[in-house]
């Protein structure tokens, strides 16, 4: 699933391309919205909220989308080939009078709601690591609300901190020197983890090349997607296990260093 910085970048692309311009094409390829036509209305802004995208349109309406695992928004200039996937994967086409076209591919969540009702789809989220509502004290309170919960599960729960996906979960656990299976209440100095999460997403929100390591000579990530490769710190091979959280059946493997990270290991079958 895309991380909060990826969604922030998508919102920035849509906002730059569409905001302040009138729609000349509004094509939503989902059954419940297929006949909706907002042509002539001005796009007011696109803002991210955790992993959600909210495109606000004149007349008090918001197009809400979520990328989930592999959705994306692409912006194209006139004559530019649409490269984002086959045509049958297109779920939304928004074109404006400034000759920019935003195309949404493989969007699993796409709905239109009144702007005043946005809380219905994002009101459950915790403080947004890249949003104006960021509150580190509230994020910490939510993170520690269930002390026995595994750290990885608590970090991935968007009701605690909005914007952390599997990449940042693995990297944050490494930087905290704790396995994702450590009860979150046993984590030393959890406020440092919250501050680190904020720092990492802030540092990466404007770059497509996400990095969590300090040295340019290293790979960009400590553990994520590095199974079998040596740990930067101790040389121990990075291990991988099924996800540590509460959604079985999803392809979200968890990476960790069994030497640098302390606490319980996964319960493997």
Image (cartoon, helix red, strand yellow):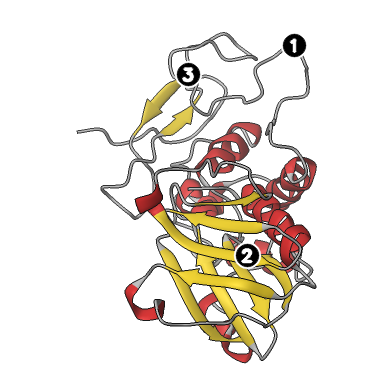
Q: Are marks 1 and 2 in contact (CB under 8 Å)?
A: no
Q: Quadrant of the C terminus?
A: top left
**Camera sees residue 113:** yes
Q: Are marks 3 and 2 in contact (CB under 8 Å)?
A: no
Look at the numbered disc 2 and give the secondary structure of its residue.
strand
Is tag 3's residue or tag 2's residue first in the polypeptide sequence? 2
Residue density around tag 1, few if under 14, some if 14–19, many if 20 or more, within 10 Å: few
Residue at 43 percent of width and 49 percent of height:
69
| Residue 253 placement, left or right of 201 | left
Secondary structure under tag 1 reads loop
- Tell which tag, 1 or 2, sits nearer the viewer: 2
Label at residue 232: none
Q: Is residue 89 left or right of residue 74?
A: left
Q: Which numbered disc flags the more N-terminal residue, 3 or 1?
A: 1
Q: Is residue 241 shown above or below 23? A: above
Q: Which residue is mark 3?
A: 238
Nearer the observer, 47 or 235:
47
Depth check: give the residue in front, 11 or 35.
35
* Residue 111, x across and y down, in percent: 46, 76
Residue at mark 2:
95
Q: Residue at x 55, y 56 (%)?
A: 103
Mark with earlier residue (1, 2): 2
- Asked where in the image residue 196 lies, by quadrant, the reply is top right
Residue ID for mark 1: 217
């Amino acid at each position: 699933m895309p991380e909060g910085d990826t969604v922030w970048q998508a919102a920035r692309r849509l906002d730059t391309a569409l905001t302040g311009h009138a729609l000349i094409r509004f094509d939503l390829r989902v059954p419940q919205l297929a006949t909706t036509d907002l042509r002539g209305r001005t796009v007011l802004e696109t803002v991210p909220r955790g992993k959600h995208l909210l495109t606000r349109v004149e007349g008090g309406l918001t197009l809400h989308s979520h990328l989930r695992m592999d959705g994306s928004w692409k912006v194209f200039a006139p004559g530019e080939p649409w490269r984002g996937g086959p045509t049958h994967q297109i779920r939304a086409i928004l074109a404006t009078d400034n000759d920019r076209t935003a195309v949404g591919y493989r969007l699993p969540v796409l709905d239109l709601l009144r702007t005043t009702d946005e809380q219905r789809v994002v009101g459950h989220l915790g403080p947004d690591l890249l949003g104006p509502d960021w509150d580190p004290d509230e994020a910490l309170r939510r993170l520690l609300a269930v002390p026995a919960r595994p750290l990885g599960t608590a970090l991935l729960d968007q009701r605690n901190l909005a914007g952390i996906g599997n990449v940042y979960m693995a990297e944050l656990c490494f930087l905290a020197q704790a396995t994702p299976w450590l009860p979150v209440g046993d984590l030393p100095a959890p406020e440092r983890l919250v501050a680190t999460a904020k720092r990492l997403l802030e540092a990466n929100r404007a770059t497509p090349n996400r990095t969590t390591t300090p040295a340019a000579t290293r790979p960009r990530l400590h553990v994520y997607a590095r199974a079998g490769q040596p740990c930067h710190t101790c040389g121990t091979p990075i291990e991988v296990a099924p996800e540590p959280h509460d959604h079985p059946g999803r392809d979200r493997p968890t990476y960790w260093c069994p030497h640098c990270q302390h606490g319980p290991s996964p319960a493997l079958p």
